[in-house]
């Protein structure tokens, strides 16, 4: 049963990312990273270089990211069952969600598509490792580790 729950969790997270990518396409259009939205922006700050991939911080993202974090934590609150494994699974899902959502934004956005998924077309993804932004590789690796930790049997459950 546990492998099925993991597969369903991964599939549901990707499905959520698909829907939200399409919502963001409707909100942002061709102007990614809230470029044309009526929101405040901090373009340059040394903390953005460390924690935000050198991208601007916007009011849109400042509210959106914690909101999604709260949504993903809702099952833990609703069921009243919190533990470190569940928290690892939630953070793994959040990271997988954002990377998938970001990539699907490009895939389904009529202004981009897969053909324009490259650094010269996407100025807000500053650091690339090969065919994808460095954020993707780091987040997918950490997400994979967190999924693995959330699935490991505890010594008393072996």
Image (spheres, grey):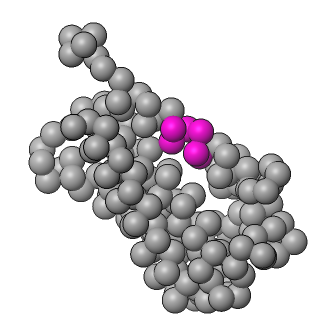
Residue for point 44% across, 53% down: 94
Residue for point 27% across, 44% down: 5
Q: Main secondary structure of the magenta part?
A: helix
Residue 152, placed above or below residue 156 = below
Closest to the observer: 33 or 130? Answer: 130
Residue for point 63% across, 75% down: 107
Query: Can you tell which quarter of the image residue 56 is in?
Result: bottom right
Furthest-right residue in this view: 120
Residue 21 seen in the figure = yes
The quadrant the C terminus occupies is top left
Furthest-top residue in this view: 155
Magenta-colored stretch includes residue 142:
yes
Q: How many marks?
A: 0
Residue 30, placed above or below residue 43 = below
Q: Specify start and end residues of the magenta stretch as a single range.
A: 139-144
Question: Percent x, y for residue 82?
Answer: 21, 38
Residue 47 seen in the figure = no
In the picture provided, is 115 more to the left or to the right than 31? right
């Amino acid at each position: 049963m546990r492998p099925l729950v993991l597969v369903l969790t991964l599939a549901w997270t990707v499905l959520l990312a698909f829907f939200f990518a399409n919502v963001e396409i409707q909100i942002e259009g061709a102007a990614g990273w809230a470029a044309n939205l009526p929101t405040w922006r901090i373009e340059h700050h040394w903390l953005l270089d460390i924690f935000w991939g050198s991208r601007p911080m916007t009011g849109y993202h400042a509210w959106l990211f914690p909101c999604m974090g709260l949504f993903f934590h809702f099952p833990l609150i609703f069921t009243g069952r919190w533990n470190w494994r569940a928290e690892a699974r939630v953070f793994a899902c959040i990271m997988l969600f954002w990377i998938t959502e970001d990539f699907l934004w490009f895939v389904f956005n009529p202004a981009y598509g897969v053909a324009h998924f490259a650094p010269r077309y996407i100025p807000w993804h500053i650091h690339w490792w090969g065919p994808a932004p460095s954020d993707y590789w780091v987040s997918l690796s950490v997400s994979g580790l967190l999924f693995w930790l959330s699935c490991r049997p505890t010594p008393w459950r072996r």
